């Protein structure tokens, strides 16, 4: 739908040293001129084609204007460019860059799908198709890293639960007392290869707001472990979890699966007694030095519901803050690793804290929590497409490691590489994107373009 007619030109008579005129008159222009990098990244990954292959189109072909592949690509690229709402589809329907991303002529190509079409597509999501899409997403990520990394020794799988606050009548949203609001509780899985700092998203599952902490964890690991073993036959697999996953069923599965594990354990009276011999001397040290003191120990712990005892790593710490009384701060990790307690806690368990940054990128930069559809499965589709958009950005992050954008997260990458004003000019022989010469990140943009298959013109 076209926007209503408005005044396209405004005058600021005294804002500068002479009258300043602003006019919305540039034809065939877009504010997402750099987004062709996302299309180039997908060409390397084959992600959108893999997702599309899982969703057969039962509509009458003669009546279809927007194929399933176009609808998936339109949503993923829009989310990646910072347009996560279904209503954004109407505003972008004639955008030349977004047409180009879908393989259409940027000038004469037909309009993109409207918001009602997008919404109808989202509400056709069914559990079996969504499971197939989840498999396709994981397979694509694993295949990408198999090509990238040879001789992987260890792969660490992190599972993290986050909350997605809801407002409205979404199916299976419930009030959660811990978060004190109505919500969903998505489960996100990431992979880390050897000692790399970066974690790579491999799966995202939407769960009801009243889901138990471990809900879906075992089934997700059952899905991922065989894929990883086939792709990286010589690698050790390690699972790293927070305290919400420390249940007999999870431990039994991890041990039966033959993987390494480090799982945080909430404190209790028995564990407190285990930590006391280490905490007692620290209190005396803190009283003298007025500085936080830490040491590491280990023990054997068996909860009443466990069939056997397990090795427990103890981080014994007494925290001192100026003006406050010293405070005991013990932490516990259950593991089957054999290294020293300090090494396990500091070098194996603590790095999982960086997974919080992946959740922040998903939620703050890609609107991972935009699950406002009334149907639960439609919201799972949104979660999957948002995960796909993040995977495209992670491909850009890999390519950016040799540029000034090394280590940049999604908001910075979008600002530097995607949200660039452009005029699109099409001739008989070629399409030209006229990007601003003054763009501050033109050099890394061009380097990424060449890394993704472009050549110097």
Image: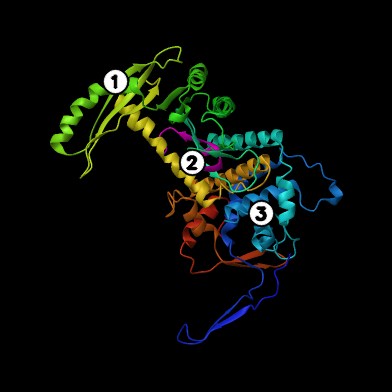
Q: How many marks?
A: 3
**In the structure shown, which secondary structural element does the residue marked by tag 2 occupy?**
loop
Residue 432 location (% of width, % of height): 63, 65
Is 366 magenta? The answer is no
Which badge, 1 or 3, is on the more N-terminal residue? 3
Q: Which part of the image, by quadrant, shows the N terminus?
A: bottom right
Image quadrant in which you'd find residue 81: bottom right
Dot 1: few (<14), some (14–19), or many (≥20) neighbours within 10 Å? few
Q: Residue furthest left?
A: 288
Tell me if residue 457 can be seen: no
- Circle on res. 273: 1
Residue under circle 3? 86
Residue 131 position (above or below residue 370): above
User: Residue 374, how many percent across, how many down?
Assistant: 67, 45
Can I make out residue 284 in this image? yes
Residues shaded magenta? 180-201
């Amino acid at each position: 739908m076209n926007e209503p007619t408005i005044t396209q030109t405004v005058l600021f008579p005294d804002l500068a040293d002479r009258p300043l005129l602003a006019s919305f008159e540039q034809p065939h222009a877009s504010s997402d001129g750099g987004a062709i990098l996302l299309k180039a990244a997908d060409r390397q990954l084959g992600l959108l084609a893999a997702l599309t292959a899982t969703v057969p189109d039962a509509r009458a072909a003669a009546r279809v204007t927007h194929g399933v592949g176009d609808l998936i690509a339109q949503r993923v690229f829009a989310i990646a460019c910072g347009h996560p709402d279904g209503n954004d589809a109407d505003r972008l329907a004639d955008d030349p860059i977004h047409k180009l991303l879908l393989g259409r002529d940027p000038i004469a190509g037909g309009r993109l799908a409207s918001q009602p079409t997008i919404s109808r597509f989202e509400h056709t999501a069914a559990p079996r198709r969504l499971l197939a899409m989840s498999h396709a997403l994981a397979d694509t990520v694993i295949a990408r890293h198999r090509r990238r990394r040879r001789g992987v020794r260890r792969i660490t799988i992190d599972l993290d639960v986050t909350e997605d606050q809801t407002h409205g009548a979404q199916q299976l949203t419930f009030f959660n007392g811990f978060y004190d609001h109505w919500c969903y509780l998505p489960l996100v899985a990431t992979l880390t290869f050897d000692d790399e700092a970066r974690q790579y998203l491999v799966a995202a599952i939407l769960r009801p707001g009243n889901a138990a902490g471990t809900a879906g964890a075992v089934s997700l690991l059952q899905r991922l472990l065989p894929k990883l073993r086939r792709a990286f036959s010589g690698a050790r697999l390690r699972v790293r979890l927070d305290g919400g996953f420390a249940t007999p069923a999870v431990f039994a599965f991890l041990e039966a699966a033959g993987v390494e594990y480090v799982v945080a354990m909430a404190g209790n009276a028995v564990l407190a007694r285990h930590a006391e011999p280490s905490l007692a001397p620290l209190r005396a040290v803190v009283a003298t030095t007025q500085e936080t003191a830490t040491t590491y120990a280990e023990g054997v712990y068996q909860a009443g519901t466990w069939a056997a005892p397990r090795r427990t790593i103890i981080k014994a710490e007494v925290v001192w803050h100026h003006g406050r009384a010293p405070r005991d701060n013990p932490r516990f990790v259950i593991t089957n690793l054999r290294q020293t307690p300090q090494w396990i806690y500091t070098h194996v368990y603590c790095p999982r804290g960086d997974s919080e940054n992946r959740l922040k990128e998903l939620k703050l930069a890609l609107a991972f929590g935009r699950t406002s559809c009334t149907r639960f499965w439609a919201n799972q589709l949104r979660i999957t497409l948002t995960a796909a958009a993040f995977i495209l950005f992670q491909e850009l992050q890999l390519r950016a490691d040799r540029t000034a954008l090394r280590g940049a997260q999604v908001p910075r990458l979008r600002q530097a590489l995607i949200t660039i004003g452009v005029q699109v000019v099409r001739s008989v022989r070629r399409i030209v994107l006229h990007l601003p010469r003054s763009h501050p990140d033109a050099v890394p943009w061009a380097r990424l373009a060449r890394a993704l298959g472009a050549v110097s013109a």
